[in-house]
Amino acid sequence: MKAQDIHSYSELQRQIHNDLRIQHPEWVQPNGESPICDSYEERLMKLLAHLEEVGADGTAAAPAYRGN
């Protein structure tokens, strides 16, 4: 998948997940798990969530709608 082929947040997450493991095979355990990659993915998701809360100019963005 190329960057221009990513159309959703879940596709971006999957691409990051795959790319980390390709770029750092030494972080992947024989069973396929990778706590280091998981940690990086979690940190990135927190940063992205923060960006949703802050607009490009640094002011608070409108809260995302969270349906009931």
Image (cartoon, rainbow, N blue to C red):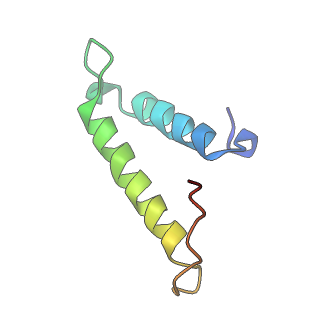
Quadrant hosting residue 35: top left
Which is more toward the observer, 52 or 40?
Answer: 52
- Residue sitting nearer the eye, 45 or 60: 60
Q: x, y percentage for residue 52?
A: 53, 67
Residue 51 at x, y percent in the picture: 50, 69
Q: Quadrant of the N terminus?
A: top right
Q: Nearer the viewer, residue 7 or 65?
A: 65
Q: Residue at x 42, y 34 (%)?
A: 23
Residue shown at the point (51%, 77%) measured from the top left? 54
Residue 6 x %, y %: 69, 42
Residue 6 against residue 31 in the figure, above or below = below
- Left or right: residue 20 versus residue 57 is left
Whether residue 43 is situated above or below residue 29 in the rendered picture: below
Residue drawn 36% across the image and 32% down it: 24
Residue furthest out toward the top: 31
Where, by quadrant of the figure, is residue 8 drawn? Answer: top right
In the drawing, does residue 44 fall left or right of residue 55?
Answer: left
Quadrant in the picture for residue 22: top left
Number of numbered labels in the structure image: 0
Which residue: 53% across, 87% down?
59
- Percent x, y for residue 41? 38, 44
Q: Viewed as shown, does residue 30 lie left or right of 41?
A: left
